[in-house]
Image: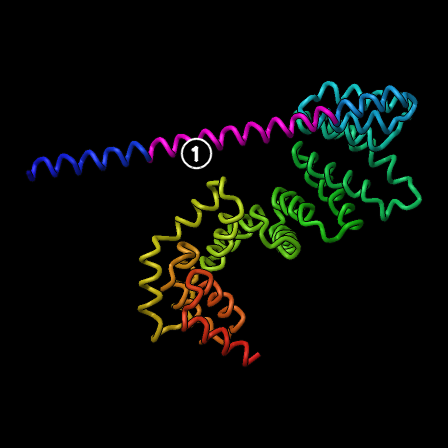
Amino acid sequence: MTALSSRNGWLDWAVRIVALLVIGALLYLAYTVWQGQRQAQGSSLATRAIANLEQAVRDNPENPNVYILLGDAYRDTGRPADAIEQYQKALELEGDHPVALSGLALVAMQQKEWRTAEGYWQQAVEVLSKNQFASQDLRLEKAYYYYGTVLIKVGEYEDAIAYLKEALRIRRGDADTHYALSVAYREVGSPNNQRDSLEAALLFVPTMPEANYDLGLILLAEGDEASAAELFRRAVDNAPGRSEPLDELMALGPFDDRYEAAAALEDSDPEEALYEARIAVSLDPENVDALRLTARLWEEAGETEAARTVWERVLALLPDDPEATEAVAAIDDES
């Protein structure tokens, strides 16, 4: 009887496992079908848009702008040769059309033909900079930015710096331009300017993974492991497919060592304890014990806003946590 019961139990489990596998297969099939329908729908919309633009070209053969729009559509759907043909037709109608030149430059960049792209961006800049309102022309800002990034690719860093600065004169708050400028400064061996540019990029886009990672490397070289760890964590969270920031972050571990050091120093050396705790929570941002310790240490250091941020992270993991709730309320009362 026991053997039969055991056998029936195993059969029940086998049936359940098979059922789960079947359900999983059906869910995967449904997802695959849905993805295919989505891609087909997107492809269909793109096809219709291109067909409409092709008709617009036939209806307006003397208008360079419709050729450019069609060229953009071809470029964005992976048809670079067709895109080039349309941009060239636009230039036949208007020999210095800056948008057509920009289109050719972007196609060259897609194909990693940096010197070709450099020539087209140079032409676009020359045309656009002659406009009456050039100092406010976002097309010129775009041309300066891309020209600068291409010059970085070909190793002409000083010239890249000059053009990227011109882009920032038109649009000061562009994080991508600040970051590109930091790369150029790094390559010419100007660490102070590199750091300033990275900090400017993060001022406008705090989550930018590249800027967080590069600034983290600078701080790590200066010996500030805690701040570097926080920047690496932000880079990891916002660029999950990149291994570099995660590798740098993990090299600061293991978590247990950092957390235990922080806990041991909490009473005797709270400043050093906070340093270790910041690294610990960067290594494991969902460890509630480490978060609590870090929040308390920030409060003890008088940094109430930093403490509040960490307590809110505790509440995100444990919404009804009494200690975190009370701490946030106390900080609100004080402020």
Q: What residue type is labelled 1?
A: Leu
Residue at the image position 63 percent from the left and 29 percent from the top: 41
| Location of residue 153 with respect to 93 vertically, above or below | below
What stretch of residues is rendered in magenta?
A: 20-48
The answer to whether 235 appears left or right of 158 in the picture is left
- Write the residue at 48% across / 56% down: 230
Instruction: Work out whether 244 lies above or below 287.
Output: above
Task: Name the spot of residue 65 as percent of width and height, x first.
Answer: 86, 29
Q: Which of 93 and 46 is in front in this view?
A: 46
Q: In which quarter of the image is residue 89?
A: top right
List the single residue furthest toward the left.
1
Disc 1: CA contacts within 10 A as few (<14), some (14-19) or many (>=20): few
Task: Give the quarter of the figure containing the C terminus.
Answer: bottom right
Give percent across and percent down for residue 166. Answer: 78, 46
Provide residue 306's location: percent of width, then percent of height: 51, 68
Residue in view at x 89 percent, y 21 percent: 59
In magenta stretch: residue 324: no
Q: Name the residue under label 1.
A: 27
Q: In which quarter of the image is the N terminus?
A: top left
Residue visible at 12% across and 38% down in the picture: 6
> Can I make out residue 142 in this image?
yes
Place of residue 155 in the rendered image (x, y in percent of width and height, measured from the top left): 66, 34
